[in-house]
Image (cartoon, grey):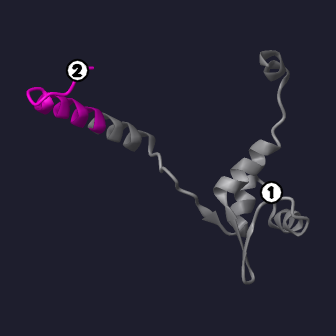
């Protein structure tokens, strides 16, 4: 990388803008939402986890899954539910060999 000088500033600025545009295109293609956390109601949480609504109620009553209580409503963070799923992940035999 060149040392910035008054003479090469326009060229370096152009390179930086091109790189920024490339990053923006990549993000748009991947549809990445940087800190997006979707809040789900109980049916959405059940669908996300592949469980019944009744099972979700049971897990909430036993404090087995992360949830948010707002008045009488139960809400769930999709990010927290994803972490909950990953925490229960077991390593396959191949994973043990890599460690």
Q: Quadrant of the N terminus?
A: top left
Q: Residue at x 38, y 44 (%)?
A: 28
Q: Quadrant of residue 46?
A: bottom right
Q: In the rendered image of this protein, does residue 70 appear above or below residue 79? A: below
Q: What range of the chain is rendered magenta?
A: 1-20
Instruction: Classify mark 2: residues with Cα within 10 Å, few (<14), some (14-19) or many (20+).
Output: few
5 is within the stretch colored magenta:
yes
Q: How many numbered circles are shown? A: 2
Gap between marks 1 and 2 measured at Cα: 57 Å
Q: Determine the residue located farthest toward the bottom in the rendered image.
A: 71
First in sequence: mark 1 or mark 2? 2
Q: Which residue is found at the position 27% from the left and 38% from the top? A: 21
Asked if residue 42 lies in the magenta stretch, the reply is no
Direction from residue 50 to residue 33 in the image, left or right: left
Residue on which disc 2 sits: 2
Asked which secondary structure carries label 1, the reply is: loop
Image x and y of residue 18, in percent: 23, 33
Q: Quadrant of residue 20?
A: top left
Residue found 76% across the figure and 53% down from its top: 50
Residue identified by numbered label 1:
51
Which one is nearer the viewer's eye here, 89 or 15?
A: 15
């Amino acid at each position: 990388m060149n040392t910035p000088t008054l003479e090469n500033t326009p060229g370096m600025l152009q390179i930086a803008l091109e790189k920024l545009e490339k990053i923006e295109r990549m993000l748009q293609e991947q549809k990445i939402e940087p800190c997006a956390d979707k809040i789900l109601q109980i049916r959405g949480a059940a669908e996300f986890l592949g469980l019944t609504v009744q099972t979700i109620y049971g897990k909430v009553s036993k404090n087995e899954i992360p949830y948010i209580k707002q008045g009488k409503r139960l809400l769930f963070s999709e990010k927290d539910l994803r972490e909950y799923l990953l925490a229960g992940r077991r390593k396959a035999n191949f994973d043990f060999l890599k460690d």
